[in-house]
Amino acid sequence: MIRRFWTRRIRLEAPVLTDKERRSALAVPDGTPLWEAVMCVIGEHIDDATNITRAPQTAAQPPLLAHQAGGLDALMGLREDLAARRKDALANPVEL
């Protein structure tokens, strides 16, 4: 017989920002340390993914190449999306 150690369910909910709150949070000026740090970390991940994607060992394994290329594309899309949302938030500020 299998005993259940967990007798109750624990439900975790992440706080959800409204569209206005998200736009307001993204409207940070150039040089904001947190924004620069986030973009730097994303850039480092892009650099790593680029190096792995370009490696001859990766080219020898088509499934790995496809996986890496997809991850690289997703990271680049994330960086572009965040930059576009920030630019839009700065151009069209909202009041909470």
Image: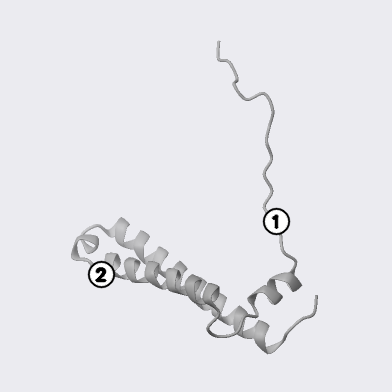
Residue 62 in the image, given as x and y percentages of width and height: 28, 59
Point out the tag, 1 or 2, that comes first from the N-terminus: 1
Mark 1 and mark 2 in contact? Answer it, CB < 8 Å: no
- Inter-mark Cα distance, 1 to 2: 39 Å
Residue occupying the far right of the picture: 96
The image quadrant that residue 48 belongs to is bottom left
The image quadrant that residue 30 belongs to is bottom right
* Three-letter code, disc 2: Arg
The C terminus lies in which quarter of the figure? bottom right
Residue occupying the far top of the picture: 1
Q: Residue at image x 45%, y 73%?
A: 76
Count up the numbered dots: 2
For residue 6, the mark is: none
Q: Residue at image x 53%, y 83%?
A: 31
Label 2 sits on residue: 54
* Three-letter code, disc 1: Pro
Residue 16 in the image, given as x and y percentages of width and height: 71, 59
The N terminus lies in which quarter of the figure? top right
Q: Residue 72 vs residue 95: left or right?
A: left
Is residue 77 among what the camera can see?
A: no
Along the line of sight, the residue nearer the viewer: 56 or 94: 94
Q: Residue 58 vs residue 96: left or right?
A: left
Picture layout, residue 6 above or below residue 94: above
Judged by depth in the image, the label closer to the viewer, 1 or 2, is 1
Label 1 sits on residue: 15
**For numbered disc 2, what is the local secondary structure?**
helix
Residue 20 in the image, given as x and y percentages of width and height: 75, 73
Q: Residues within 10 Å of mark 2 (few under 14, many from 20)?
A: few
Is residue 16 among what the camera can see?
A: yes
Residue 91 in the image, given as x and y percentages of width and height: 67, 89
**For numbered disc 1, what is the local secondary structure?**
loop
Q: Residue at image x 54%, y 75%?
A: 35
